[in-house]
Image (tube, rainbow, N blue to C red):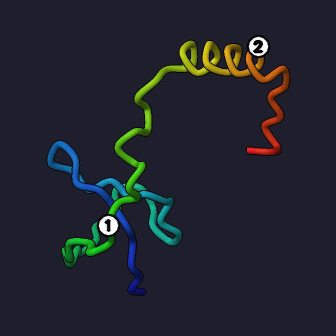
Amino acid sequence: MSQVVSAVYKNGHFIPLTPVPGLRDDQPVELRITPSRKQPHRLSRFVGVIGQDEADELTGIIAEEFEKVNPDEW
């Protein structure tokens, strides 16, 4: 069975970005490494920049300033 699995290389290990169906833990595999040509989303560098407390504070400020925050409208 051959399949393409997207992964990241971190601290000397390949980490799949999604579960790999059909493999059991500790099963040997062969890897063919092809660096991805996909460009990261231009906003991905901001992921995790603020914590939950800061996000809650910003939501509160928005609610006060605009009187209503409806997450379904974002």
Q: CA distance from mark 2 to mark 1?
A: 38 Å
Which residue type does callout 2 highlight? Glu
Residue labelled with disc 2: 64
Write down the quadrant of residue 4 in the picture.
Answer: bottom left
Is the residue 45 above or below the residue 58 in the image?
below
How many residues crowd mark 2 within 10 Å: few (<14), some (14–19), many (20+)? few
**Residue under the image location 73 percent in, 44 percent down:** 74
Q: Position of residue 54 (x, y in %)?
A: 54, 15
- 26 left or right of 73? left
- 18 left or right of 4? right
Decide which of tag 2 and tag 1 comes sooner along the chain: 1
**Residue under the image location 71 percent in, 14 percent down:** 60
Residue with the most extreme bottom position: 1
Write down the quadrant of residue 62 in the picture.
Answer: top right
Q: Position of residue 11 (x, y in %)?
A: 17, 42
Which secondary structure lies at badge 2?
helix
Which residue type does callout 1 highlight? Gln
Q: How many marks?
A: 2
Residue labelled with disc 1: 39
